[in-house]
Image (cartoon, rainbow, N blue to C red):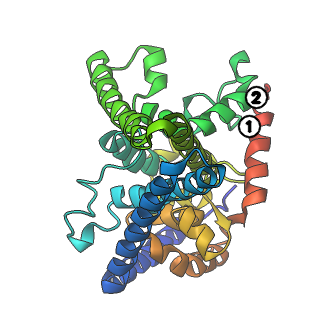
Amino acid sequence: MTTQLSDADHAAIAEELDALGREIAADLGERDAAYIRRVIRWQRGLEIGGRAMLLASALPPAWIAGTATLAVAKILENMEIGHNVMHGQWDWMRDPEIHSTVWEWDNVSPAEQWKHSHNFVHHTFTNVVGRDNDVGYGILRVTPEQEWHWAMLPQPLYNLLLAMFFEYGVALHDLEIDKIRAGTNDPEETRRKLREIGRKVRRQWAKDYVAFPLLSGPQFLSTLAANFTANAVRNVWAHMIIFCGHFPGDVEMFEEDRLDGESRGEWYVRQLAGSANITGGRLFHLLTGNLSHQIEHHLFPDMPSNRLAEIAPRVRALCEKYDLPYHAGPLSRQVTSTWKKIFRYALPT
């Protein structure tokens, strides 16, 4: 649990972090713009290279190399580019092609629905049980504050399936499954969202499972299998990184009354206590979309991802100054901790 802080402490924390955010915003420039444009060029090059190799997908070496390259391209597109562009991290560039209002990612989840469920709901109500739909994604119990039901018993299996088909879970996220179960949703709004999801799914399937396999002619089935595998690899990776950002052992969950009269400083502290980082090298951070700096991302959701590693030591120093937790660990430890929690809360507690 976070240390009891005074109102003066919360005000000082808000002042320090607001100043840090303003300092980085004032320093953004060509170096940052060049970074995201370079990542987009690399991603597109990898995708073209992967799909070109899959034109010979009947040959095992071409299938393996093409699938791996395409999977990396999809990971980069979803994590470092799609997620961060749709957060508005690069809107300051005023580039009409790299802007949160126009970007549509390589994923079955419609961008507009994702921006509502993620940018607004998740980032506003981070780890507040009953308000943040990312707490268990509507099918998992990850904290004792969630009511247990016998249907939770097989939840490790649910989580495995969710990882494999994570983009579909994300696509359904904004439907707010809990409201549908309770009968409190707006049926017309739910149907509208379902139609949007259906259109996006058809577009993605037409691209990955019809058009590109057809281009490879008699190797249609092997190319289709390669595209399915690349999507599955991307899904499992994204699920792992995102779950390790909020569910490892000591990361805190909060009751709804925490929101009553919450000050800006208290909001910052909730983001700090409700998030976890993953340690690693520069390539690892790139492939996570810099969500390995989940704590810094939650403090500054619209800060360009290439700046999160830079501010991490200063955020950690602030945590030490106010005796606040700073959850961080290697991927293996965060994954193990998260899965232990999913097994533990499958049982009544």
**Residue 166, position in %: x, y?**
55, 39
The amino acid sitting under disc 1 is Ile
Label 2 Cα neighbours within 10 Å, binned few <14 / some 14-19 / many ≥20: many
**Residue 9, position in %: x, y?**
54, 71
Q: Distance between the residues labelled 1 and 2?
A: 6 Å
Give the answer, above or below, for where 111 lies relative to 290. above
The amino acid sitting under disc 2 is Ala
Q: What element carries label 2?
A: loop
What is the number of the mark on residue 346? 2
Please report contact status of discs 1 and 2: CB closer than 8 Å, yes or no.
yes
**Residue 38, position in %: x, y?**
39, 75
Give the answer, above or below, for where 272 lies relative to 319. above
Q: Give the labeled residue for mark 1.
A: 342
Q: Which of 210 and 62 is in front in this view?
A: 62
Q: In this view, does 11 lie to the left or right of 103?
A: right
Disc tally is 2
Q: Which residue is drawn at 65% across and 67% down?
A: 324
Q: Which of 272 and 138 is in front in this view?
A: 138
Q: Quadrant of the C terminus?
A: top right
Q: Quadrant of the N terminus?
A: bottom right
Q: Quarter of the image holding residue 180?
A: top left
Give the answer, above or below, for where 331 lies relative to 33. above
Q: Nearer the viewer, residue 108 or 278?
A: 108
Q: Is residue 38 left or right of residue 226?
A: left
Label 1 Cα neighbours within 10 Å, binned few <14 / some 14-19 / many ≥20: many
Give the answer, above or below, for where 251 lies relative to 167. below
Residue 220, visible in the rendered structure: yes
Q: Which residue is drawn at 61% across and 37% down?
A: 164
